[in-house]
Image: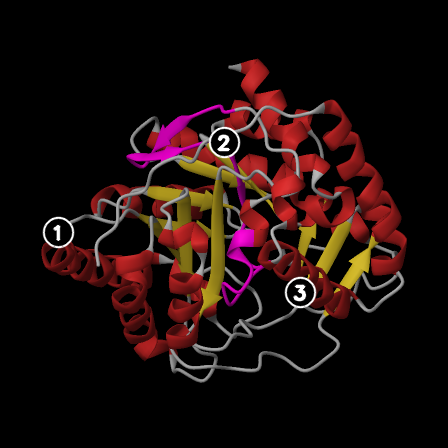
Amino acid sequence: MARATIAPRSIAISPTADVSNKLLYALARPVLFSMDAERAHHLTLSLLKRASGLGLTSLLAAPLPDPRTVMGLPFRNAVGLAAGLDKDGTCIDGLAALGFGSIEVGTVTPRPQAGNPLPRMFRLPEAHAIINRMGFNNGGVDAFVRNVQRSRFFQDRQGVLGLNIGKNADTPMERAAEDYLLCLEKVYPYASYVTVNISSPNTKNLRQLQGGSELDSLLAKLNDARHRLADRHKRQVPLALKIAPDMQQDQIEAVAQALLRHGIDGVIATNTTIDREKVKGLPHAEEAGGLSGKPVFEASNRVIRALKAALGDTVPIIGVGGIASGADAKEKIAAGASLVQLYTGLIYRGPALVRECIEALRRAG
């Protein structure tokens, strides 16, 4: 069923509630950081889901509104949740209660897959960073869609919901487009926008889809499918492309031209990096996988600036990578982003980071 996205009501923050939120996370963080990173991740989502089911998340302080219209969608504020935190869409309601202006869940693949062997997630606290090689672990697109449908966020049309799609690890690269097309068709009726993830370093050869003829072919097929789906569902769902921070200037310019050629509605910059220069010598720094957090901040900004120079105001940019403060969020916008997303900073700073970023961007106008 087609759905229109509307912004929910927002509640002014009580200073007491905000202090309580910070205190709760200050108490919880040492416990979570004493656990294996992936176990802590799952525990956090489980507790947040349970709190949402009991109605306890309604006690969280909600930010003041700062509405933005991007990709034709009404965002209640400019700070979103990045994909990867909730791969299966099981905790949409709990995450929405943290005050985000949008929620992006996934990456989802056509068939369920376990992902890479454990351990596959590592904290680098000295750098406020995480390395992960999860490998698109998820329960498959059919289970994912059921989870989305069950969420109150979707049912009540509470806000912007991004659904992030990928390919199965065992799908040959020459058939990768088939996986993206299947996922697009299944998630289309339930998404505010769909993100095409071709930039994870943890699925073999996936990043080759960012280049030349492979990217042109994929985007052409997705755009054709999107037009057919728009006719069927009587609404056009924006498509966004998520890219890596490790591209050179000429590669970024080529991606920008492909976005323009194929009418893609947005670009998310960036995913994790394979570069280790900024964490050299730290424990876990040589683990395989994608590095996120503060070490990717400048690389992400470099890509955003290059995209902005190539795209102007034609294709909006969503800035991701290393945001750990309100000032960082402002710098992403100054580089050329229209919106920002958080993930690793949320792990290190807790829910208070969401409000800090929203307030910084609201004051900046």
Place of residue 196 in the rendered image (x, y in percent of width and height, measured from the top left):
38, 58
Q: Which residue is mark 1?
A: 234
Q: Quadrant of the N terminus?
A: bottom left
The answer to whether residue 83 is visible is no
Q: Main secondary structure of the magenta part?
A: loop
For disc 3, the marked residue is 46
> What's the amino acid at mark 2?
Ala
Q: Residue at the spot x=56%, y=36% of the render?
A: 302
- When the figure is inspected, residue 320 is found, relative to residue 92, above or below; the finding is above
Q: Is residue 4 something that shows in the picture?
A: yes
Q: Inspect the image, locate mark 3, and give the three-letter code of the amino acid beneath it.
A: Ser
User: Mark 2 and mark 3: span between their CA atoms?
Assistant: 26 Å
Residue drawn at the location 44% of the way across and 30% of the way down:
338
Q: Secondary structure at mark 3?
A: helix
Q: Position of residue 267 (x, y in %)?
A: 40, 44
**Residue 134 sits in quarter:** bottom right
First in sequence, mark 2 or 1: give its number: 2
**Disc number lying in front (1 or 3):** 3
Cα separation between marks 2 and 1: 27 Å
C-beta proximity under 8 Å, tags 2 and 1: no
Give amino acid for label 1: Lys
Q: What percent of the width, then of the height, locates residue 10?
A: 50, 29
Callout 2: SS = loop
Task: Classify mark 1: residues with Cα within 10 Å, few (<14), some (14-19) or many (20+).
Answer: few
Callouts 1 and 3 close, C-beta under 8 Å: no
> Going 40% across and 82% down the picture, which residue do you hit?
171
- Residue for badge 2: 78
How far apart in space, not on screen, are marks 1 and 3 (Cα)? 36 Å
